[in-house]
Each structure stands twice: as C-alpha cells, then as structure tokens.
C-alpha cells in the first residue's frame, strides 16, 4: 500500500482543517453563560483548564510525525 505525496498532503490538510474547526467549536462552547437573573442561581466559572484542544493538536502532530517517518523509511 503506497501513499503518494498528494494523498499525504490532502490528508494533512484535512486533519489540520478538522483540528481548527474543533478548536473553534470548543472556544465558542466556553462562552456560554450560566443560568442567572432574578430567582436563578449563578454558577461560578470553571477553574479547570480544558485539555481537549491541546490534546487534539498533540495527536495531529503525532500523526504528521508518523507519516513523515513512514515516508523517510520508504525512500531509503
């Protein structure tokens, strides 16, 4: 099973686009206000740092590095 350069390029850009779209959705999700107003209870802002965005970037980097290593092995 051989991968051409254009196929790897397309895969890389598809992963980059999916990562960017996912990070944008997560950024918007952090901005939702809690219930408040008269008679409502307000929730304090969360103190934990979400790791989803960073983890997906690390995963995408690992995939890109793995593809690079595979390409280098096949060229030898």
Image (cartoon, rainbow, N blue to C red):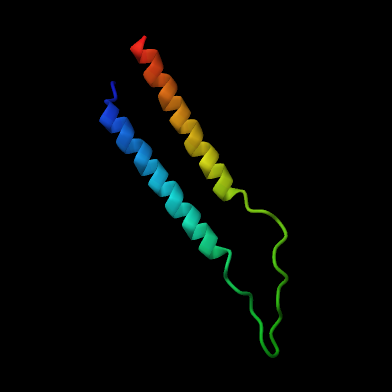
Q: Position of residue 7 (x, y in %)?
A: 28, 32
The answer to which quarter of the image holds residue 12 is top left
Residue at point 69%, 90% (across, down): 38
State whether residue 49 is above or below residue 66.
below
Furthest-top residue in this view: 76
Residue at point 29%, 27% (across, down): 5
The answer to which quarter of the image holds residue 48 is bottom right
Q: Is residue 45 left or right of residue 22?
A: right
State whether residue 37 is above or below residue 12.
below
Q: Position of residue 49 (x, y in %)?
A: 67, 54
Q: Is residue 64 left or right of residue 34?
A: left
Residue at point 57%, 43% (across, down): 55
Residue at point 70%, 89% (across, down): 39
Nearer to me, 28 or 1: 28
Q: Position of residue 31 (x, y in %)?
A: 57, 68
State whether residue 62 is above or below residue 39.
above
Q: Is residue 36 left or right of residue 16?
A: right
Q: Position of residue 1 (x, y in %)?
A: 29, 21
Task: Count the labels in the image.
Answer: 0
State whether residue 45 is above or below residue 64.
below
Looking at the rendered image, the quarter that the C terminus falls into is: top left
């Amino acid at each position: 099973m051989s991968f051409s350069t254009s196929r790897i390029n397309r895969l890389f850009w598809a992963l980059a686009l999916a990562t960017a779209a996912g990070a944008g959705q997560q950024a918007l999700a952090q901005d939702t206000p809690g219930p408040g107003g008269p008679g409502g209870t307000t929730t304090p802002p969360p103190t934990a740092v979400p790791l989803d965005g960073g983890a997906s970037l690390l995963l995408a980097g690992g995939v890109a590095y793995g593809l690079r290593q595979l390409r280098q092995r096949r060229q030898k």
